[in-house]
Image (cartoon, helix red, strand yellow):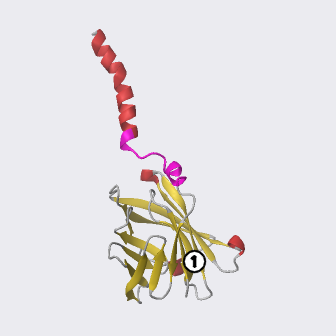
Amino acid sequence: MASLNKYLSLMPIFFVSSCSVLYPISLEIIDDIYKEPKNIYLSKSKLNTEDSTYILKSSNGSSNTLTWISSDNNSVLVSKNGKFIKTIGLKYNFTINSKFTLKDIIPLLNPFYDTKTYILLENPLSGYLELNLRYSLLENYQDCDCPVIKESFRSDSISWSGDNYYWFDENYRVVKSLQNFHPYGPPYKIEYLD
């Protein structure tokens, strides 16, 4: 009986320690690893990152969707009206369900707009996770006279949250952005050179 009590007293320690293995460490700590965002520069037909060059492969004008393929054909980036919605072939890939464009959100901001969507993360494969989004318009953000939309995101199931920023020109096209694609990857600073 004494040996059974010994094992029963160790069971909570086993369950507590095994749970910490099953769930990711706080993502805020992991994000601290990346001090500087990766830079992406876009033009009408080319996308340059610090790691490779991407060529515009296809454009669907009606949905504002652009598909970029790396020059070595190992990775693909897909954007919709300036917001990246899918990556293939990167270390940390994602797919986000996006039925609207950022341009569609601007008239709905009063003073903010809340919605939710779903995101699929790879490495590790997450399955589709609910992603809560809150959009707000920032005035004179970083001394810019242009409209800037802040997209705050939160996935409670993996304790991941953060902010993405989108700078617009007078025609409400995204000209610059800072986007987080994956909780384990770096943020991406994207500038449109057109």
In the rendered image, residue 36, in percent from the top left (x then y), is placed at 57, 62
Residue visible at 45% across and 70% down in the picture: 51
Write down the region rendered in magenta.
21-33
Given residues 67 and 72, the one toward you in this image is 72
Figure quadrant of the N terminus: top left
Would residue 118 be counted in the magenta stretch? no
The residue tagged 1 is 176
Residue visible at 54% across and 59% down in the picture: 162
Given residues 11 and 180, the one toward you in this image is 180
Counting the numbered discs, the total is 1
> 146 above or below 3?
below
Q: Residue furthest top?
A: 2
Neighbourhood count class around disc 1 (C-alpha, 10 Å): few under 14, some 14–19, many 20 upward: many
Tell me where residue 192 sits by quadrant. bottom right
Helix, strand or loop at disc 1? Answer: strand
110 left or right of 161?
right
> 56 above or below 86?
below
110 left or right of 186?
right
Residue visible at 64% across and 78% down in the picture: 147
Would residue 22 be counted in the magenta stretch? yes
Q: Is there any visible trace of residue 66 in the rendered image?
A: no
In the rendered image, residue 95, in percent from the top left (x then y), is placed at 37, 68
Q: Is there any visible trace of residue 192 in the rendered image?
A: yes
In the rendered image, residue 61, in percent from the top left (x then y), is placed at 41, 90
In the rendered image, residue 6, in percent from the top left (x then y), is placed at 33, 15
> Amino acid under label 1?
Lys
Residue visible at 51% across and 57% down in the picture: 161
Figure quadrant of the C terminus: bottom right
155 left or right of 10?
right
